[in-house]
Image (cartoon, grey):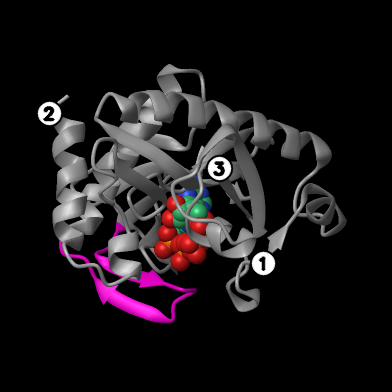
Amino acid sequence: MEKLEQIYEGKAKKVFKTDDENLYIVSYKDDATAFNGLKKGTIVGKGVINNKMSNMMMQLLEKHGVKTHYVKELSDRDTLVKKVSIVPLEVIIRNVSAGSFSKHYGVEEGIVFDEPTIEFSYKNDELGDPLLNAYHALALKLATKEEIETIKTMAFKVNEVLTEYFKGLNIRLVDFKLEFGRLPSGEIVLADEISPDTCRLWDLTTNEKLDKDRFRRDMGGVEDAYNEVMKRLTSK
Ligand code: ADP
Ligand code: UDP
């Protein structure tokens, strides 16, 4: 399958048409951004790692009954996916306090929750991805009630599967962001990516950060962290 016209270039990926109108090719870049594009940089090799990791996660989730957009890995950076109409919601699941949760509610990072939390933000760069609840999403017609219920159920299922899987790699899945899309049939599938760009991953023993927070917070060792995650994923 060949890349045809580029239809979109985002912050981390490019999206191409193919000769099948129902399929896209996504191409992962090394570009990194944070704080809604205010901070820009490069994480060498990130595109390859995010592509491969995301594809491994999507295949694992499919095995556990979660429908995804994944079709086939084409190369180090390129993957064939089902074309979806993206539901403009960033769905965030948290197991442990960190990042904006800690900031909003004035609590330290690292508090382990009894139950995971879910929150939505409106995927809209101009507005800075504002937080909203399910009623707001309905009012804005971003999704139907049924779609929101399906998305919630799927997101918690993803959390169960991935939490267990990462435990086996001695990694704590702190939080992550998911995106969902609609197939032409209307069916909701998991789309976009699952990678150290979109998850907080802490070493279970040392709490060392193995994710994009190293870039966001200028902690150094960014490439090493991505490589370490990949090493654990592939040595299992
Ligand atoms: P952003 O748009 O936030 O800068 P990316 O650089 O990751 O993000 O760009 C990838 C874009 O492709 C995102 O807008 C994402 O919602 C979209 N996307 C992901 N998977 C699919 C898919 N299967 N079909 C259509 N669009 C997709
Ligand atoms: N996240 C993401 N894209 C976004 C916002 C958040 O992938 O646009 C991920 C982020 O990597 C983290 C989780 O969602 O794993 C929760 O992020 P948070 O709300 O704490 O925001 P941040 O601290 O990144 O501003």
Between discs 2 and 3, the one toward the N terminus: 3
| 218 displayed left or right of 99 | left
Residue at left offset 34%, top offset 45%: 201
The residues tagged by marks 3 and 1 sit, at their Cα atoms, a distance apart of 16 Å
Q: Nearer the viewer, residue 144 or 7?
A: 144
Which residue sits furthest bottom? 38
Element at badge 1?
loop
Marks 2/3 in contact by CB < 8 Å: the verdict is no
Residue 130: numbered disc = 1
What segment is highlighted magenta in the picture? 28-44
Element at badge 3?
strand
The residues tagged by marks 1 and 2 sit, at their Cα atoms, a distance apart of 39 Å
Question: Picture quarter containing residue 16?
Answer: bottom left
The disc labelled 2 sits on which kind of residue?
A: Ser
Between discs 1 and 2, the one toward the N terminus: 1
Question: Picture quarter containing residue 6?
Answer: bottom left
Return the x and y of residue 76 as percentages of the image width and height: 18, 48
Distance from mark 3 CB to nearest ligand 2 atom below 8 Å: no
Residue at left offset 24%, top offset 42%: 206
The disc labelled 1 sits on which kind of residue?
A: Pro
Question: Dot 1: few (<14), some (14–19), or many (≥20) neighbours within 10 Å?
Answer: some
Instruction: In the rendered view, tell whether residue 159 sits above or below residue 224.
Output: above
Element at badge 2?
loop
Instruction: In the rendered view, tell whether residue 18 sits above or below residue 231.
Output: below
Instruction: Report the residue marked by disc 2.
Output: 235
Residue at left offset 16%, top offset 64%: 44
The residues tagged by marks 2 and 3 sit, at their Cα atoms, a distance apart of 27 Å
Q: Nearer the viewer, residue 190 or 107?
A: 107
Instruction: Report the residue marked by disc 3.
Output: 93
